[in-house]
Image (cartoon, rainbow, N blue to C red):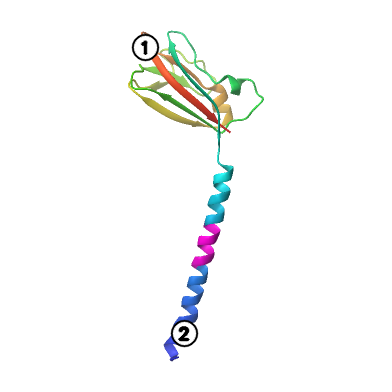
Amino acid sequence: MDFIGRIIAPALETIVDSLTRFVRDDVTLRKIQALNAARQSYFDQAVATGATIVFVPQAQQGEQTFSFLLFVTDELSGRGRFMINGTPVSATRGFPIQSAGFQVLISGHENIKAFQAQAEAGQTLNYTWGVFQ
């Protein structure tokens, strides 16, 4: 083996060894993340009109803690509003829910517990929600 080969071979061996460890550690980490990923606990699908307030009753009961709320309206749904800070939602107060399909992912148990949605005047919300632990 020549001089350059004696220098490069160990360096390449070190690089290959490092990359092998990185891939092995990444696979292990991804497996742990997959096993610990939030799983859906509850699901609801309904229609809300007028003064109907949509909320997550399981979060209100305080027996369980949730990580995420996925709230989705379909393409036939009208406009609405939602709040997550405990301020009562109304047909004119809150973050807008666009008509013809909308989705939002809300994180944090306190935000999920305080979540409320309502249709705007003369509108109907065709909604689905799921909470994840």
Q: On the rendered image, what quadrant is the N terminus found in?
A: bottom left
The residue sitting at the right extreme is 63
Q: Amino acid under label 1?
A: Gln
Residue at 55%, 59% (x, y): give it.
25
Marks 1/2: CA distance?
Answer: 74 Å
Callout 1 touching callout 2 (CB < 8 Å): no
Measured from the top left, where is residue 17 in percent x and y? 52, 71
Q: Quadrant of residue 56?
A: top right
Q: Quadrant of residue 40?
A: top right
111 vs 63, left or right, is left
Span shown in magenta = 19-26
Residue at 67%, 25% (x, y): give it.
63
Q: Quadrant of residue 96?
A: top left
Q: Label 1's element?
A: loop
- Asked whether residue 49 is drawn in magenta, I would say no
Measured from the top left, where is residue 14 in percent x and y? 51, 74
**Circle 1: is it few (<14), some (14-19), or many (20+) Cα within 10 Å?**
some
Where 1 sits versus 56, above or below? below
Residue at the spot of label 2? 7
Q: Amino acid under label 2?
A: Ile
Measured from the top left, where is residue 68 in percent x and y? 53, 32
Q: How many marks?
A: 2
Residue at the spot of label 1? 123
* Of the pair 6 and 110, the residue shown nearer to us: 6
* Of the pair 82 and 93, the residue shown nearer to us: 82
* Residue 97: assigned label: none
Q: Label 2's element?
A: helix
Q: On the rendered image, what quadrant is the C terminus found in?
A: top right
- Asked whether residue 23 is drawn in magenta, I would say yes
Task: Pick whichever of labels 1 and 2 is earlier in the sequence.
Answer: 2
Residue at 43%, 8% (x, y): give it.
50
